[in-house]
């Protein structure tokens, strides 16, 4: 059974928990699942999406910077909620919580 899996990481793309989540996503996509990883971005004003090694990575910009960027930005949270409401999935896995 092919699952549509969304993994949520509040870390910036390429840092911290992003690496652990991305590696798990690659392994799950190897079993035939559709995996999307939601992360924070250091730049931009709208979400960006790219496909890397079987994982779709969606990066959301933040109005805050530094230590406040890791999940405390309401603008970023709103964009993530909007993205999730427009994209159906079977499983959501969060690596951190705020």
Image (cartoon, helix red, strand yellow):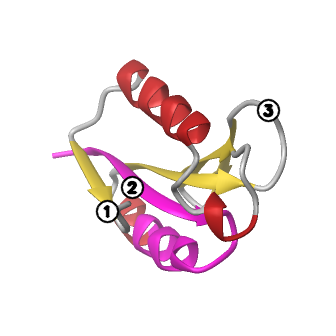
Q: Secondary structure at mark 3?
A: loop
Report the magenta residues as a range: 1-26
- The residue at the point 36 percent across, 22 percent down is 85
**Which percent across, then down, holds residue 18?**
56, 71
To which residue does mark 2 refer?
A: 7
Front of the two marks 3 and 2: 3
Q: Residues within 10 Å of mark 3 (few under 14, many from 20)?
A: few
Counting from the top left corner in percent of width and height, residue 24 is at: 40, 73
Q: Secondary structure at mark 2?
A: strand
Asked whether 16 or 66 is in front, the reply is: 66
Residue 44 relative to residue 3: left or right: right
User: Label 1's element?
Assistant: loop
Query: Measured along the vertical axis of the image, is residue 11 above or below residue 3?
Result: below
Which quadrant holds residue 50?
A: top right
- Screen quadrant of the C terminus: bottom left
Q: Which residue is mark 3?
A: 45
Q: Residue at x 65, y 47 (%)?
A: 59
Position of 25 with respect to 47 (left or right) is left
Instruction: Say whether marks 2 and 1 touch (CB < 8 Å).
Output: no
Marks 1 and 3, the one that precedes in the sequence: 1
Say which residue label 1 marks. 31
Which residue reaches farthest left?
1
Question: Mark 1 Cα within 10 Å, few/some/many (few <14, many 20+)?
Answer: few
The residue shown at (46%, 24%) is 82
Q: Nearer the viewer, mark 2 or mark 1?
A: 2
Q: How far apart are labels 1 and 3 at the CA level?
A: 34 Å
């Amino acid at each position: 059974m092919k699952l549509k899996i969304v993994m949520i990481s509040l870390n910036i793309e390429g840092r911290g928990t992003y690496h652990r989540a991305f590696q798990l996503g690659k392994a799950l996509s190897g079993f035939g699942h559709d995996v999307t990883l939601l992360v924070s971005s250091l730049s931009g004003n709208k979400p960006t999406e790219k496909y890397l090694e079987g994982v779709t990575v969606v990066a959301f910009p933040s109005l805050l910077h530094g230590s406040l960027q890791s999940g405390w930005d309401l603008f970023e949270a709103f964009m993530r909620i909007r993205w999730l409401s427009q994209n159906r999935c079977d499983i959501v896995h969060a690596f951190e919580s705020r």
